[in-house]
Image (cartoon, helix red, strand yellow):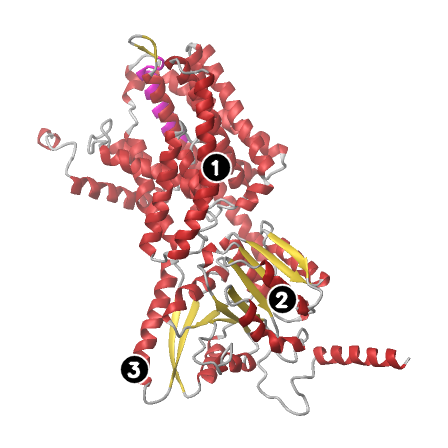
Amino acid sequence: MDAITLYLPITDPTWVFFIVLCIILLAPMIFNRLHIPHLVGMILAGALIGENGLDLLDRDGSFELFGKVGIYYIMFLAGLEMDLEGLKKNQTRGLIFGALTTAIPFLFGFISGYWVLGFSMPASMLLACILASHTLVAYPIVGRYGLGKHPSVTVSIAATMFALLSALLILASISGTFKGGNDAIYWSMFAVKCIIYFVCIFTICPRIIRAFFRKYSDNVMQYIFVIAVVFFFAAMAELCGLEGILGAFLSGLVLNRFIPRTSPLMNRVEFVGNALFIPYFLIGVGMLVNVKPLFTEEGALVVVAVMVIAGTLSKLLAAHITRKLFKMDPSSGLMMFGLTEAHAAGALAMVMVGTGLEIRPGEPLMNNAVLDGVVMMILISCIISSIATDQAARNLTLRGLDETASEKDYSDDSEKIMIPVSYHDNIESIVGLAIMMRNQKRNSELIAINVVYDDEHSEAMHEHSRKILTRAEQVAASADVKMVTQSRLATNPTSGLVHAVRENDATELIIGLHHRRSIVDSYLGSFTTELIGALSRQIIIVKSIVPLNTIRRIVVAVPERAEFETGFVRWVERLSRLADEIGCQIVFHATERTSALIMSRVRHSHPNLRASYELLDSWDDLLLLSEDMNYDHMFVVVTARTGSISYQKSFEQLPKLLERYFSNNSLMIVYPDQFGEEPDNLTFAEPRGKTAANISRMSRWMSKWISKIG
């Protein structure tokens, strides 16, 4: 045994990293079987291998570094996945819960410290700050269940920021008192630095971020840039006298609108954090735990018990009062308690400040017994927080599945998106658009297809087709979306694609805008024009000028009587989902009746969407919309096939109008579902024109003619 201890703790970097990776790999397997959140497993594993356990590993600089990155990552993801529109709607709840989850624990902490533990007034105030603040340690559980936009989560995150900021201000006041800097000049400088910081990150930084994403599309560069932004915000926050975790959270808020939830970049951000940095942080927290003083030092057990009981009861009481006040369900209340219960980096930083401040020479404000007590409280609070959050997330997810199953949604009865790809330069934008428009809950696969013209060059074109389809599959895989690829040989590309749609039972097509090769070439191209006439399924034609994540507004022009088309619900749902994913505003220009129906649908499926509605009395007013279009706006035209109920004669001039007035904008042309079946067998007895559109136009003509005679 002594021979083994000679080699402990292990310091070789290769073995250290191997052991950490084994813990990250095995902890979820073991603790999931025990029905315990794996976050708890990481912390307990850290306590086991640390210097106060088996002394297998030393808490060296790597744990300090990766632990810092890990806690920043947690706060960054909380801001990145936050529902900003939901926050606006729940800001009152967030502020009230923030006030309660700060004031009640602060009161409990002060009473516990001053009257129960016999601390001095400043030490009791510092203990109150520690209990009032909390860290979103359990947030990865929320992300795993996809509940980042649930109201209870949004309210909890807002309350976290309120509590953290309040605790930091009180901490700064206590620290300033001991250091002799707690005067008007100190607070004036602090206020000025904070104002400059907030103005910079919310006004200047978004412009820089937007410009970067618009100019650089390389996946690695984008990820490095995002992480650099996180640490820049954190470093600047520390320069201002705030905590770095607050800056990391604010970086998530700023980047929120630039990283769609279903984008490949979001997938990379979450993957790296959840796979490496966050587990490293949790293991590092566990390595701080020292159980020995609880049984060797007098009063240590009492300090831990008082802190844990006061902290847990006060956070539970704050969540319970908020739940009752706003009539929320029990699972939401449990979620709020779970997310606000854990203490970690903030508490540790505050107690370290307390041990560094001296009441008199040689006598610190907080001794080592309090430090050990806080570390034990961190362990216990993280365990309680993880268990409560996991249980609440399970309950909310199951309830959400029940609600989804009980609601009939035409637009998602069947969803199979097919993407014809021909050019390398627009693969990422088209596949990215399809990923954002798809229903994540159904998790249906995408179909990428390339039709090769059957001639003497078909062999060479097959190789080109393979490369294009491989690239499309890579883009989908980077967003963790399954894609099926097909290369099809056909003597007529249009008929080949039409047959592929029928064979795969595709519900819609997303296709890039035709590349004009000559002056006489049409705007849509003969292939797209033939496809529109041959298919009755929804077809979306796309042209992207700027990356989708940099679009600030989607402007939608909707023709009269569009609500009577078969595919009305489908395209409304697709556009709403796109705007929701991007996080941009969407403006529908339509008649009063059509706008009312669109509004009803949007409020039902996407209640937090930033949607507005403008009146468009006449399709001739379409040109007026070009005056308010900017380069980072997307213009969407909902049109119709010839003979359908919403078809207008002016649609024939639409290609010329779009080419002339909207050539500098990202563009989308939507041809909705028009018929229940494909219009294969057309006869003179039952022509395609025999529709409500022709009847409606005939009725208006007859009415005008009769009124003139009269």
Quick check: 17 left or right of 566?
left
Quick check: 326 left or right of 270?
right
Report the residue marked by disc 3: 460
Report the residue marked by disc 2: 623
Q: Secondary structure at mark 2?
A: helix
* Mark closer to the observer (1, 3): 1
Image vertical order of residue 299 relative to residue 290, above or below: above
- Residue at image coords 36%, 26%: 348
Report the residue marked by disc 1: 199
Q: 542 or 662: nearer the eye?
A: 662
Q: Which mark is residue 45?
A: none
Q: What's drawn in magenta, residue-wise?
A: 365-381
Q: Position of residue 358 (x, y in %)?
A: 33, 12
Q: Mark 1 or mark 3, which has the lower sequence index?
A: 1
**Magenta stretch encompasses residue 371:** yes
User: In which quadrant is the C terminus drawn?
Assistant: bottom right
Q: Position of residue 372 (x, y in %)?
A: 32, 21
- Residue at image coords 35%, 35%: 235
Residue located farthest toward the left when viewing the structure as drawn: 3
